[in-house]
């Protein structure tokens, strides 16, 4: 493998604590900058990011913190609502989180030093992933170790529940196919549910377990990817793989991460046209991964830092 595939992060942003999860908003927020949220042990920070690839007057990366939300318990997942806009007066921020206490919290803020938070209760074990309905953001879907996929309205009511055959690890709601949910289970099965009939209409079996993460390609609905055990159908991580995420800017580009280690966590960026990773990165005790909405750039959290890698294709 060529040495030039191994790269340090292009940019870093300092944080006050260990970052457990980080998430770019996948939606246009009405600003040249991108919304980004990251979660620590007690809080969530919401801010905007701008990169020199978007604006030559920016020196590398420009991160502006907009609001710190006191969370109280460790944040495990973050999902952005498509309703979040910075071009409204006042601005409107909405996102949800899942925490180690098995609860979902729905946060709404106008960035005026206060916010509204609703607690959604029902899951009986760890929540592994959650997502907003991507057109209007009026529903939330979540999957958990309690073998359920649940849908919620914005008042905090559980509206639908699907019984799974193993822990739910990932859930995707595609903007081009709003009547279907993709649910990935730890036993290695990925099912697509019809939300009208509330039945599974298609299933894919990886043939291996445990499946840890899966994603539905934003720019091509026929592409689904997952990491199972220590690979994604090619040898990849020396340790267990933890996350799989398609690029939002390039349908042939995706990233995988290894489990957060005691020293470092490995990031691999792959291209479907290349047999080996096109980029390898490493972050100190890295956690979480997210792709920028329009750039081939991904971020992972770490010990008091955010690490950003730009993929040059």
Image (cartoon, helix red, strand yellow):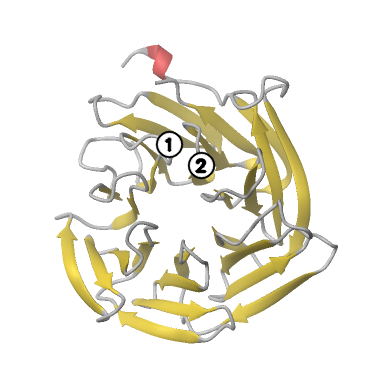
User: In the image, 256: left or right of 189?
Assistant: right
Q: Position of residue 227 (x, y in %)?
A: 30, 48
> Badge 1, how many Cα within 10 Å: few under 14, some, many 20+?
some
Is 38 situated above or below 275? below
Q: Is residue 285 visible?
A: no
> In percent of the image, x 59 and y 34: which residue is there?
307
Residue contact at pointers 1 and 2, CB within 8 angstroms? yes
> In percent of the image, x 25 and y 31: which residue is there?
272
Element on which disc 1 rests: loop
Front-lying residue, 258 or 15: 15
Front-lying residue, 67 or 279: 67
Residue position for label 2: 293
Is 272 situated above or below 119? above
Query: Where, by quadrant of the figure, is residue 8 drawn?
Result: top right
Distance from disc 1 to disc 2, alpha carbons, whole Å, reads 7 Å
> In percent of the image, x 44 and y 35: which residue is there?
267
Residue position for label 1: 249
User: In the image, 182: left or right of 64?
Assistant: left
């Amino acid at each position: 493998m060529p040495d030039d595939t191994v790269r340090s992060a292009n940019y870093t942003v300092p944080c006050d604590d260990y970052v457990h999860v980080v998430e770019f908003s996948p939606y246009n927020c009405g600003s040249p900058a991108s919304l980004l949220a990251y979660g620590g042990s007690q809080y969530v920070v919401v801010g905007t990011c701008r990169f020199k690839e978007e604006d030559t007057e920016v020196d590398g990366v420009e991160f502006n913190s907009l609001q710190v939300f006191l969370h109280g318990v460790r944040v495990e997942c973050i999902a952005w609502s498509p309703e979040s806009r910075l071009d409204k007066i006042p601005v409107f921020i909405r996102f949800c989180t899942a925490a180690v206490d098995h609860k979902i919290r729905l946060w709404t803020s106008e960035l005026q030093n206060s916010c509204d938070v609703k607690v959604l209760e029902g899951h009986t074990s760890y929540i592994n992933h959650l997502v907003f309905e991507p057109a209007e953001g009026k529903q939330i879907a979540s999957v958990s170790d309690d073998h359920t996929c649940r849908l919620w309205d914005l008042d905090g009511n559980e509206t639908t529940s699907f019984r799974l055959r193993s822990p739910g690890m990932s859930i995707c709601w595609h903007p081009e196919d709003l009547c279907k949910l993709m649910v990935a289970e730890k036993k290695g099965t990925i099912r697509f549910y019809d939300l009208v009939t509330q039945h599974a209409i298609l299933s894919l079996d990886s043939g291996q377990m445990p499946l840890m993460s899966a994603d539905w390609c934003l720019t091509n609905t026929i592409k689904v990817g997952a990491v199972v055990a220590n690979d994604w159908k090619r040898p990849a991580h020396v340790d267990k793989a933890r996350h799989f995420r398609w690029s939002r800017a390039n349908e042939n580009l995706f990233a995988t991460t290894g489990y957060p280690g005691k020293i470092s966590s490995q990031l691999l960026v792959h291209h479907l046209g290349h047999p080996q990773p096109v980029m390898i990165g490493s972050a100190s005790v890295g956690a979480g991964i997210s792709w920028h909405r329009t750039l081939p750039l991904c971020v992972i959290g770490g010990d008091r830092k955010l690490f950003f890698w730009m993929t040059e294709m």
